[in-house]
Amino acid sequence: MADLKILLSEKELPDRWYNVQADMPNLPKPPLHPVTREPVGPQDLAPIFPTDLILQEVSRERWIDIPDEVRDIYRLWRPSPLHRARRLEKALDTPARIYYKYEGVSPAGSHKLNTAVPQAYYNKKAGVRRLATETGAGQWGAALAQACSFFGLDCTVYMVKVSYHQKPYRRSVMQIFGSEVFASPTDRTASGRAVLAGNPDSPGSLGIAISEAVEDAATHADTNYALGSVLNHVLIHQSVIGLEAKKQMEKAGDYPDVVIACCGGGSNLGGIAMPFAHDRLVEDRKIRLVAAEPSACPTLTRGLCAYDFGDVAGLTPLLWMYTLGKDFMPPGIHAGGLRYHGDSPLVSRMVADGIMEARAYGQTDVFESAVVFARSEGVIPAPEAAHAIHCAVEEALAAREAGTPRVILFNLSGHGLLDLASYDAFLGGRLEDYALPEEQLGEAMAKLPAVE
Amino acid sequence: MADLKILLSEKELPDRWYNVQADMPNLPKPPLHPVTREPVGPQDLAPIFPTDLILQEVSRERWIDIPDEVRDIYRLWRPSPLHRARRLEKALDTPARIYYKYEGVSPAGSHKLNTAVPQAYYNKKAGVRRLATETGAGQWGAALAQACSFFGLDCTVYMVKVSYHQKPYRRSVMQIFGSEVFASPTDRTASGRAVLAGNPDSPGSLGIAISEAVEDAATHADTNYALGSVLNHVLIHQSVIGLEAKKQMEKAGDYPDVVIACCGGGSNLGGIAMPFAHDRLVEDRKIRLVAAEPSACPTLTRGLCAYDFGDVAGLTPLLWMYTLGKDFMPPGIHAGGLRYHGDSPLVSRMVADGIMEARAYGQTDVFESAVVFARSEGVIPAPEAAHAIHCAVEEALAAREAGTPRVILFNLSGHGLLDLASYDAFLGGRLEDYALPEEQLGEAMAKLPAVE
């Protein structure tokens, strides 16, 4: 019988990342300076990012070499396996052939390490001593902590206070890798102190934590800032997922009709989808690309494509993207990694241009599919990744309905072993679905910054 | 550069398990009936085990076919990777070449699934509807829950009450896979009710939980019992680890001078070591086999090799094994899976005969090595597996001292993502080492059952 897992040798690890900007019919509008509202130049980013990453951010080159030092770390777990989900197919009684790329084999447990490693590398190379970042649920913070440990960089993580206390184990992971982790808001930064002055018991937010990390980096010459999603260079690094998956599908003698990933900021989606978008854009292949998002934070399905800030305080450049408005406060769903008001500009452009589709799902349905998947394939998925699973299940059932085969590829971006409380809530019938009334959505979007 | 991971294709998955009993110069003394103290016969085991497993338990055949149905499940994650730990070698500045077999890639997160799957399979084949088992920390319960889910068996887990409340996430894993989990002692069994009558607030113990699971199986015609370690058939199933590792070492063009695993009941140790023991016993190869155990539960290094019960209540057959006495209560170290008073009879025989060595380590040293390993190789190890790591580090440093190369292979039996509280304790300086005075050890051993 054909193998369940399609593996690549380390020699088949890609030696170049793919940059979809080379092949897009339209590029996103450029980021604007938060004060002047003029396009941001490399010099504006230099205080917090190293030159190599700034060049990648604006690059139109199709291929970007992966440094050997990065590939040497990637080889600890990459190439990651592509699984044929035969047991899931059987459970769904579908004629569809379902494949999933499994990024949970990374030691950090998710795809986030794919960009954390090169970000740490380029900063080390630029002589930076320390990285500062923010983290919500902790996936990104854990990945960056690990990457910094590999390259001997110090790492400071501002972790949203409510998560710091609710998710002590992701904090433990960061500390095992030698990072310092602070519950944000802290009294270490002016932004943090300002928040605490107004409300000493503030639970924190991703927006506040971003402000603290950016300020920390901007005010220390030896320190830079690192972001785990949204930006172009992050999606470029993540392309290693899709590049491997293409080779693996070829080995399997198959090609996807549809490629699916969950979408928060868009980095795992961009990672798996962009190398296939190349085939659609350049080779005119018929392939659908689908973003699965939570209906509780429906940026792509119900948001506006417009300029908005990346953070709540309005300190970051304005990005042209699908957004629900920076002041939109999504309900407390368990897929914490998908609770972001905006999206990657590259993903946004492709959705706006009809190259990529988007669908939104309620978390009860998502967890139902997650359990079906776990019982079939063995892996307990992260709640974020379970959105992609649910979309794949929907496609597989549609194929059954139509009585025709369909080749489905999705990205399983991470495992859920540090998210088991959410499964407890689901199995205990304590999971809420949230309907978002139009007014609530409209409110934050009505306050989008004016850009002519 | 040579690959960091030595992979096997699914076609290279072993199709036979290895049974070291075919090659041992001396076998362990036979199990005795708890009442008659006569050797136990197959008919004594039939009420709780299926025939196929009983036959494996007493088999002297060198090779036992792995059923296709079991291999089809193994293929979800097997063959597991063998890693060359180059970054660890560098961190230790050692001329040793260090390899580790990584069993944490199993969806259950440890080697336990290697035996849970065939146990579920043979029971299903025998027409059993439900399996009952006990679990302490939860690794075994999670693996059996998953295996039962794969084969459509019901599963009842008696989880030591203190763990049930302290380790809710392992319980969640079992529930995701559809098992019912009870905090033991329960009022569902006579053994449980007897304990509760004496102490309604009993925190439970592995001994009590075993009694409940065995009673549940013995009193329900459609229900059998399953054990995750100690017994011969368990070690036979785990031989898949060592069989793969041998092929992988061959692919790497290397051969170990020493093979290391942690030892609680002995199943992961037996799994990796026995196929190499074959080389030592049959081909006279110079290879050392080392068991790493906690100094807080030093069965092999300070126990007696004698007949003893497997459980506290004295309901199981008497096993001839290294034991600290069934009444020995080990201190509450974080490697819960190594807190067992006895050992596999096969491992015991080999230690008694000098074929296998044993070393005991304090948990502070063990966690220190675990963190060095995590920062080098990326993987956060389970506290149990960290004992093997510490032993490997000791061997690597000895090689550096001697200025000679040494090939070290150890089994990384599982990851530590559900054990992060123990890392918190270590990093927070709250980890205790326990010295066991001779008197305390002597006390339980003085009460070993008399067998002429």
Image: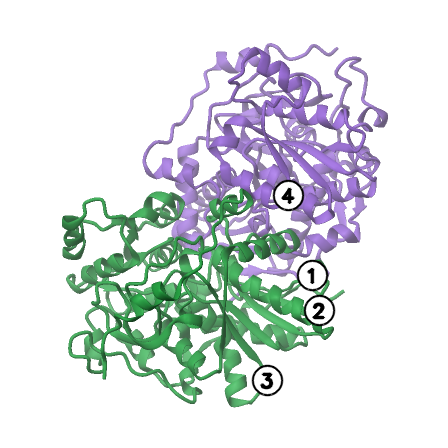
Chain colours: A purple, B green
Q: Give the amino acid at mark 3.
A: Lys
Q: Nearer the viewer, residue B176 or B101?
A: B101
As helix, strand or loop, the secondary structure at mark 2 comes to helix
Q: Residue A286: in sight, yes or no?
A: no
| Tag nearer the camera, 2 or 3 | 2
- The residue that disc 4 covers is A178
> Amino acid under label 4?
Gly
User: Considering only order in the chain, which callout, 2 or 1, is on the residue closer to the N terminus?
Assistant: 1
Residue B22 picture location, percent across and down: 41, 87
Check disc 2 and report the residue beneath it: B400
Q: Residues within 10 Å of mark 4 (few under 14, many from 20)?
A: many
Question: Where residue A308 sits: x, y (%)?
Answer: 67, 18
| Mark 4 on the same chain as mark 1 | no
Q: Is residue B363 shown to the viewer in this render?
A: yes
Which residue occupies 31% across, 81% down?
B58
Say the numbered circle drawn on residue B92: 1
- Among all residues in the image, which is located at the extreme right? A43
Q: Residues within 10 Å of mark 1 (few under 14, many from 20)?
A: some
Q: Name the residue carrying label 3.
A: B286
The span from disc 4 to disc 1 (Cα, nearest Å) is: 18 Å
Crowding at mark 3 (Cα within 10 Å: few <14, some 14-19, many 20+) = few
Same chain for mark 2 and mark 3? The answer is yes
Contact, CB < 8 Å: mark 1 with mark 2?
A: yes
Image side of residue A238 versus residue A90, left or right = right
The amino acid sitting under disc 2 is Arg
Q: Nearer the viewer, mark 1 or mark 3?
A: 1
Identify the residue at image location x=66%, y=56%. A76
Q: What is the CA distance from the residue labelled 2 to the residue labelled 3? A: 20 Å
In percent of width and height, residue A243 lies at 69, 50
Q: Amino acid at mark 1?
A: Leu
